[in-house]
Image (cartoon, rainbow, N blue to C red):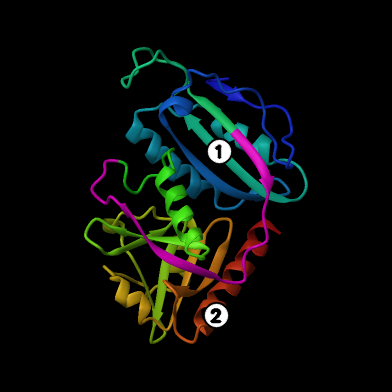
Amino acid sequence: MGGNHAQGARSPRGGRRTGVIRSDDRGFLLGDGAFETMRCKDGKVFRLTQHLVRLQRALELLRITTPPDLLERIVQAAKGPGERILRLTVTRGPAPLGLLPTITSPPTVAIVQGPIPPPPAYLTARIVSGRRNEKAAGAGHKLLGYAESILGLFEARDAGDDEAIFLDTEGHLSEASASNLFIVKNGRLRTPPRSCGILPGITRQIVMEFEPQTEEAVLWPEDLFMADEAFLTSSIRGVVPLLKVNGRRIGTGRPGPKTLEIAGRWQRLIRLELG
């Protein structure tokens, strides 16, 4: 099969997990792996090629060999009716304790499925104390280990907000916990560049294809507070209006026309490609 394959019982919440991850798996012990979260419907995976290209880059960075039958596994997992989430994880596999792997094991591949939750009508956010390290070796790659995002969400929720906004180490706007940030000013879109420690999302790229004049710009919190509109993007939520940050209203405090236009275009694209 070209690797360890975790597949098996259905979870109580309707997701599907197959098999058992070994307790000495480096993904479990060290976060030594990468992942992708994809949307599928009736056997089709939305923008599968883009997800696989991003995953391949992350695995190359980690020096993990891509399982040769990875695509086949995804295709098999995507079969079946209905729209759902596919969470694909690839780890280095089991190995003796220690940071450097002393043996070469087949990588572990785990695919978990679950329902797509209804997207929120809008979000509020808090600029949190944690920082995205734009200088980190893994910056811009979808690697395991999301403790910083989880802690940021705790901080935001404790303050009464839905989402966390991270700055980079220089104080520039970076991204949300698992989504990209856009602002709208005078009808033009602006979004933080890769140099600010973001993970370049698939939906972010789609929005930039919708709006070729989008400017990748180094932005400060004040740019967000002074924006006419703001929104967040991700593969699962899509395009969601951001109405307040740190308790301050963005624009009118209601979903703006540009945000609603882009959200509608994204929904039509999903229907076109997935049916």
Residue 107 image position (x, y, % from top left)? 48, 23
Badge 2 element: loop
- Residue type for callout 2: Pro
Q: Quadrant of residue 265?
A: bottom right
Quick one: label 2 or label 1, which is nearer the N terminus? Answer: 1
The local crowd at label 1, few if under 14, some if 14 to 19, many if 20 or more residues have their Cα within 10 Å, is: many
Residue 125 image position (x, y, % from top left)? 46, 67
Screen quadrant of the C terminus:
bottom right
Disc 2 + disc 1, Cβ < 8 Å: no
Q: Which residues are magenta?
A: 111-137
Badge 1 element: strand
Residue 11 image position (x, y, % from top left)? 72, 35
Residue 88: image tag: 1
In the image, 68 versus 24, the foreground residue is 24
The local crowd at label 2, few if under 14, some if 14 to 19, many if 20 or more residues have their Cα within 10 Å, is: many
Residue 60 image position (x, y, % from top left)? 35, 34
Q: Which residue is mark 2?
A: 255
Drawn side of residue 253 relative to residue 102, left or right = right
Q: Residue at x 40, y 47 (%)?
A: 148
Q: Residue at x 58, y 20 (%)?
A: 1
- Residue type for callout 1: Leu
